[in-house]
Image (cartoon, coloured by chain):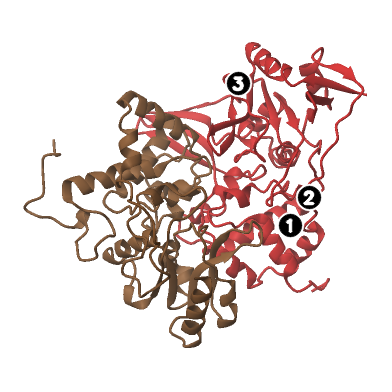
Chain colours: A red, B brown
């Protein structure tokens, strides 16, 4: 027994959410070969099949690329400031991939840690995530290595699974139930979840490697290829670094919180000119260390869902997975070294 | 051609003629050719050449970590080789301190990269040696600015709407800049923050400022390799923008960046016959 929504009914439901004034985001083909999560203006824009996963992630709907946090203006010799309120949104993300949804509980740790970032938490509270289980994977996918899979439920309010003629609807939270109440009918059939990618790396061994081989020459070799752009971090569901900058004129302006990326040379550049991570090898190592050692040591979860966007979007084919495979291929780490 | 390439590189490394080969190797993750740095003769079998060798490797020549490896041999396609000319003219590389292996090329990518339709450099010019022969039947090349000409058929309002939509998607990852051989500034104008020259927010307005500024900085310098467009995660066709300025340089000054090392770069040269009609 399961709950079902017919294939043709789903766009109607999306249209209903839009008509209710909700902000709705989902995958859309913006140009041939480019499927992105975008804010949907109509249900016709929504694309649910024909691609492995969007090239970006859903994080931008809870942690936008840029966000005003304070406005200021100069008045004589004084500066007047005015805090910006966290946004009031009521939004639904439909057709999220499980590897995107699973990033949200991971990000919650960071944004509610020693300081609650209301710009994140307010959006998060007002967001309902309707995830669509994966029917296919490609060579970049490695969710199963992170204890996730094509129908992982972490971070989702509703999980949809494709069945002939529609989608099985598994409501996982009250928020999810509210969205689909009265929209489904009970049927006999239940969905079959296709197998995910094979398990390719073991997080435990990665952590051991990272603890023991901080200065491994591997990092310098790997990083030679890295161009130092932010395509990996900016399309990663879990990367969350930001920069606070003031933008404006001599009269005043805005303090904004913008995405930043640990692969940029400027990321750690001090005002003195000194840069503690002066080379790309240190920056590449930092990215992997943060994801698979520092974050789990601090919060108990890996900062990665195995979505593979880093590899797909890297100009030179350097993803987290290929790096992890390098660590796995290195000499075994002796415990206690 | 892969066999020939490997043998040549084995010899170059064995003889100590070069210390590193910057070439393409097959990635274990996606089976596609990506940049590799081969430093030992025993590793030359990692090198490969096929029509998926998209990357323009010349972007590595100006990077400190790569320069530190010693004298390089570099594998280039005809389109990539044009960047070598620009880099040499702009005193960014010492052309005599590297060995350039040109690969004859019938086109890359499946489907073919847009740049290949107008390719007139199937055999790289100014390489130290060329592996392979010119493809037998390449057919007549499209006019160099065909894609741009088609775009210019649209009205200014339509074109603005197009670029507005493109700019709205930009996430400022700067993959376009980092992959570009002629974007080699140690500190890009967008990274200047004392004072800031360009906003780093990914707003439509600031993204316009970024892409237009970058295009202007590429005027008469962009060689049309199209790497910026290939690597963009959100599919912005920056090559189209750059082609507009390339065409201006061509029409007004008869100049095509990277095609002739004897022609002084237009940004750095002045002639009495230079047109001034565009100054208003």
Q: Nearer the viewer, mark 1 or mark 2?
A: 2
In the image, what residue occupies the spot 45% across and 37% down?
Answer: A246
Mark 3 crowdedness (10 Å alpha carbons): few <14, some 14-19, many ≥20: few
Vertical comparison of B204 with A141: above or below: above
Vertical comparison of B51 with A184: above or below: below
Spatial distance from mark 2 to mark 3, Cα to Cα?
34 Å
Mark closer to the chain start, 2 or 3: 3
Q: Are marks 3 and 1 on the same chain?
A: yes
**Callout 2 touching callout 3 (CB < 8 Å):** no
Mark closer to the chain start, 3 or 1: 3
**Residue B168 appears left or right of A204:** left
Where does label 1 land, which residue?
A293
Vertical comparison of A288 with A61: above or below: below
Where does label 2 land, which residue?
A146
Quarter of the image with the N terminus of chain A in it: top right
Where does residue A326 sit, x and y in percent of width and height? 69, 66
Q: Is residue A253 visible?
A: no
């Amino acid at each position: 027994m399961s709950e079902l929504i017919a294939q043709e009914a789903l766009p109607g439901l999306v249209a209903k959410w839009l008509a209710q004034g909700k902000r709705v985001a989902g995958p859309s083909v913006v140009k041939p070969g480019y499927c992105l999560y975008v804010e949907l203006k109509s249900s016709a824009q929504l694309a649910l099949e024909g691609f492995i996963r969007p090239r970006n992630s859903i994080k931008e709907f809870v942690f936008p690329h840029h966000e005003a946090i304070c406005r200021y203006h100069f008045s004589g010799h004084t500066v007047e400031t005015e805090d910006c309120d966290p946004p009031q949104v009521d939004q639904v993300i439909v057709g999220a991939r499980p590897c995107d949804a699973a990033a949200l509980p991971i990000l919650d740790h960071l944004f509610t840690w020693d300081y609650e970032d209301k710009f994140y938490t307010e959006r998060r509270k007002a967001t309902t995530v309707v995830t669509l289980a994966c029917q296919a994977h490609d060579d970049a996918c490695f969710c199963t290595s992170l204890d996730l899979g094509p129908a992982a439920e972490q971070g989702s309010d509703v999980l949809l699974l494709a069945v002939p003629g529609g989608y099985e609807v598994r409501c996982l939270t009250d928020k999810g139930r509210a969205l689909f109440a009265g929209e489904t009918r009970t049927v006999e059939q239940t969905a079959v979840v296709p197998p995910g990618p094979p398990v390719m790396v073991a997080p435990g061994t990665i952590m051991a490697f990272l603890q023991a081989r901080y200065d491994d020459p591997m990092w310098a070799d790997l990083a030679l290829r890295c161009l130092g752009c932010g395509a990996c971090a900016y399309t990663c569901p879990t990367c969350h670094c930001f920069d606070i900058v003031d933008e404006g004129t001599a009269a005043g302006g805005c303090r904004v919180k913008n995405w930043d990326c640990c692969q940029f040379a400027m990321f750690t550049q001090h005002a003195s000119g000194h840069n503690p991570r002066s080379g790309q090898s240190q920056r590449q190592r930092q990215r992997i260390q943060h994801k698979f050692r520092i974050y789990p040591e601090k919060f108990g979860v890996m900062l990665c869902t195995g979505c593979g966007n880093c590899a797909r979007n890297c100009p030179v084919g350097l993803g987290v997975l290929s790096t992890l495979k390098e660590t796995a291929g290195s000499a075994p780490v002796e415990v206690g070294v | 051609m892969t066999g020939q390439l490997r043998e040549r590189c084995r010899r170059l490394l064995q003889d100590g003629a070069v210390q590193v080969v910057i070439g393409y190797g097959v990635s274990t993750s996606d089976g596609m050719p990506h940049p590799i740095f081969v430093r030992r003769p025993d590793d030359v079998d990692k090198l490969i050449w096929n029509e998926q060798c998209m990357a323009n490797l010349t972007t590595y020549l100006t990077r400190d970590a790569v320069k530190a490896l010693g004298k390089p041999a570099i594998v280039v396609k005809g389109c990539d080789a044009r960047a070598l000319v620009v880099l040499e003219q702009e005193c960014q590389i010492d052309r005599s301190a590297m060995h350039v292996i040109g690969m004859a090329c019938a086109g890359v990518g499946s489907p073919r990269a847009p740049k290949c339709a107008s390719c007139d450099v199937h055999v790289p010019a100014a390489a130290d040696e060329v592996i392979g022969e010119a493809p037998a039947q390449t057919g007549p090349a499209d006019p160099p600015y065909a894609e741009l000409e088609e775009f210019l058929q649209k009205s200014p309002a339509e074109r603005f709407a197009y670029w507005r939509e493109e700019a709205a998607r930009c996430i400022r990852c700067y993959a376009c800049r980092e992959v570009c051989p002629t974007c080699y500034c140690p500190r890009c104008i967008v990274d200047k923050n004392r004072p800031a020259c360009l906003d780093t927010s990914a707003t439509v307005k600031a993204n316009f400022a970024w892409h237009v500024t970058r295009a202007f900085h590429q005027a008469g310098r962009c060689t049309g390799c199209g790497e910026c467009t290939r690597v963009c995660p959100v599919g912005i066709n920056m090559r189209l923008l750059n082609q507009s300025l390339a065409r201006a340089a061509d029409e007004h000054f008869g100049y095509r960046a990277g095609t002739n090392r004897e022609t002084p770069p237009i940004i750095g040269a002045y002639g009495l016959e230079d047109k001034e009609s565009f100054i208003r």
